[in-house]
Structure formats: C-alpha cells, structure tokens
Image: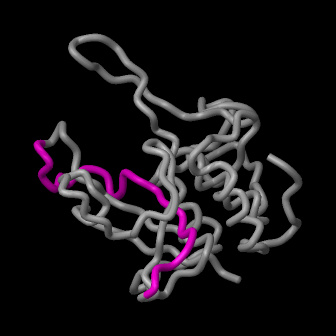
Amino acid sequence: LGEPLAALVLADRAKALDYVRRYAKSPNREVAYCAGWGLSSGRPVKIPADCTNFASQVLWYGGLPMNPAHDDTGWWYTDSCEWWGSSVSWRTVNGLAIYLTTISGRAVFARRARDLKIGDLIFYRLRRPETGYRCDIGSLFNHTTIVSGFDERGEPLVSYHSNEAEDVPWNAKSGSLKALGEACATGFVHLLD
C-alpha cells in the first residue's frame, strides 16, 4: 500500500485523493479485493463487496494509522479480506462507521453532504433487489463511498468499489432503485483534521 504517515488523523487529503485517482476504476493488485458468495441462476457466484476495503485503503494511504488491536476495537489489514487478514472495521461498512465515529473518535457525523471534505465518507443503506427494493430495517448501512471531489454547486462527488466508480454525484439518480440517490439512509462522516 505504500508508507503511511504517522498521525492520529487523516493527515494528507491530497495523498488520499491520489490513491483514489490511481485505484478507483482499476483496483490495486497488491491488495486483496473483497467479495462474497451469492447465487445467480442457482449457481454460486462471487459478488463484489470491496467498497469498505477500498475506503480503508484510501484512509490508510492518506495517513490514518492502523490500530493493530486484534479484537473488535482495531482497524488493520495484513493480507486478505478474511478474518485473519483484516479487521471487521477495515472490511465491513458498519464496522468502519462505528470504528471511526465511536471506537477511535477520529471522525464525526456531519449534518449535510456539503460539510464534507476530500477523503471524508458517505455511508448508504442502498435498496437491494433481494428485498424488492424496499427500505429494509436490517443493517444500518450497506455501502461505503469516499468523497473525491465537488461539483459546481459544492455538492460532493464520490468514488467507490464493487461497481468501480470515480467522481459520481453523491445523490445520483440513474433511473434505478439501486442508485445512490434512492438510498433509504445516508451517513455523512467527517474525519478530524
């Protein structure tokens, strides 16, 4: 991943953005790409689940130090998306949100998307086909994006993995109920400077 900065916060937003520009559309081959298993036409298939892993890579490259505690309080990566190679907070949506805002205190929830900066995060509870695109009451969030720019109105643009995307409007409505702008819930997370 490169050498991180030794700091207690996201020290270098420009460096975080550089990582986004290099790996948003073409994942870093030196780091595991997270995926889960699902069914398609009755056959097992790998389903991309790399959004939080990618966001964690960006944060680490931007200077957020790993916390190697090998329990639910840590945020770390060694070599995989499995339990022995990364923490729950490194690779899962709600794990990262809780780690940043509660366990480590390195971030706070912001009131509006416009309050965010490059390298901050937007968490979503996206509508899913398996629930008939209804707003389920299951997990708090199920998708992680990283702020990678702003449009002419000052609204954030986000980048993410699992459907590799770069500089998409944070509230994009593509005509699909799976679109970011159709999310059932959003959480704006600002990393402390």
The residue drawn where x is 14% and y is 48% is 133
In front of the other: 85 or 163: 163
User: Magenta region: which residues?
Assistant: 132-152
**Is residue 87 found left or right of 108 in the rendered image?**
right
**Is residue 63 found left or right of 179 in the rendered image?**
right
Residue 74 visible to an observer of this rendering = yes
Q: Main secondary structure of the magenta part?
A: loop
The residue drawn where x is 43% and y is 44% is 163
On screen, residue 132 above or below 80: below
**Is residue 97 found left or right of 107 in the rendered image?**
left
Residue 184 visible to an observer of this rendering = no
The residue drawn where x is 40% and y is 23% is 37
Residue 58 placement (x, y as % from top left): 67, 57
- Which residue is outermost to the top? 43
Q: Does 60 lie within the magenta span?
A: no
* Scheme by which the image is coloured: one colour
The residue drawn where x is 25% and y is 58% is 174
Residue 83 placement (x, y as % from top left): 60, 32
Tell me the quadrant of the picture where the C terminus can be found.
Answer: bottom right
On screen, residue 43 above or below 186: above
On screen, residue 27 above or below 82: below
When asked about the image quadrant of residue 181, the answer is bottom left
In front of the other: 124 or 95: 124
Residue 114 placement (x, y as % from top left): 45, 86
When asked about the image quadrant of residue 56, the answer is bottom right
Residue 63 placement (x, y as % from top left): 79, 65
Q: How many numbered discs sit on the rendered protein? A: 0
